[in-house]
Image (cartoon, helix red, strand yellow):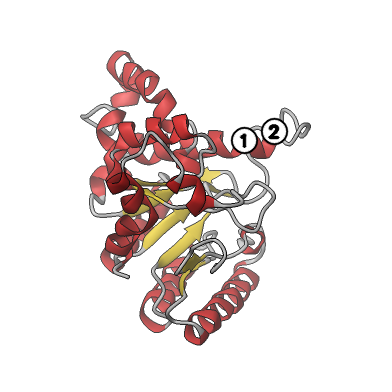
Amino acid sequence: MDSLGVDMQIVSPYVGFYNYQLPTATAVASSQATNDEINAMVRAWPQRFAGLGTLPMQDVKAAIVELERCMTRLGFKGAEINDHVNGRTLDEPEFRPFWKAAEQMGALIFFHQGGATLVSPRTKRYHLPNSIGNLVDRAVTFATLVSGGVMDEFPNLKICLGHGGGYTCFGIGRMDHGWQVRAEARAHITKPPSAYLRHFYYDSIVYTESALRFLIDSVGVDRVVLGTDWPYDMALDWPVAWILAMDNLSQEEKEAILWKNLEKLLNL
């Protein structure tokens, strides 16, 4: 962290510990063990780490109980979850109590895929399930939460979409057009999807300066926070230096992404 120029890391769990496919009792136990491990790191180095937990999302009541433990007893900032729970997107009615609880607790919900993506059934070659699959999944998460009415029902939710929100910003014009011409796209919302872009936060892991500039111009610099994807092979090697070296960002924009936005978002 010192070598990267990172003062504080928001530690999120390894996605292999989601365990949504396992019996609830097993997932609860693994969530608790994972969250306790992160809590031990935060307690050992409180000036350097803050925590996001993992939750047994296959059981909404159990997920809410563990989120409450994370927020009230462990002092976490929120939780990291997958784009779907065993194939079910998070706009399904069964997840409404979860979103209500997350809003009431002020928990940040960070979306990061775990395992197979929508691309995986068509091809597992060329690392495409990761390099493009993750971005597809994130766009579906944005679209379903918005079109399903979740963001209207819980306007104070704090949600961060990993990997710059995937293909969301690039495809938002088509989503808007679909909303205009198709009744089913307007079933739960009275505003076009683009009106919801600023209801979310996005990390900066988009790999090119032009893509980051496009993200900022689409959602506003105050909605973008620094991401690293560490320790995976898709991580940015020097994320802070990458931001600082950009010619198309002002110093104010760089400071917002590097620290100001996250300090405000998580009350650091």
Q: Quadrant of the C terminus?
A: bottom left
Disc 1 on helix, strand or loop? helix
Q: Is residue 118 visible?
A: no
Measured as percent of width and height from the top left, residue 191 is found at 22, 29
Q: Is 136 placed left or right of 48 in the picture?
A: right
- Badge number at residue 133: 1
Measured as percent of width and height from the top left, residue 137 is found at 54, 38
Q: Nearer the viewer, residue 242 or 155?
A: 242
Measured as percent of width and height from the top left, residue 82 is found at 54, 52
Q: Nearer the viewer, residue 169 or 247?
A: 247
**Residue drawn at x 54%, y 61% as measured from the top left:** 4
Which picture quadrant has residue 72? bottom left
Under mark 2, the amino acid is: Leu
Disc 2 on helix, strand or loop? helix
Which residue in the protein does label 2 denote?
Answer: 128
**Residue drawn at x 43%, y 24% as measured from the top left:** 171
**Residue drawn at x 34%, y 62% as measured from the top left:** 102
Under mark 1, the amino acid is: Gly
Measured as percent of width and height from the top left, residue 42 is found at 49, 80
**Residue drawn at x 60%, y 74% as measured from the top left:** 34
Q: What's the CA distance linking mark 2 and mark 1? A: 6 Å
Query: Eyeballing the image, is 227 above or below 217?
Result: below
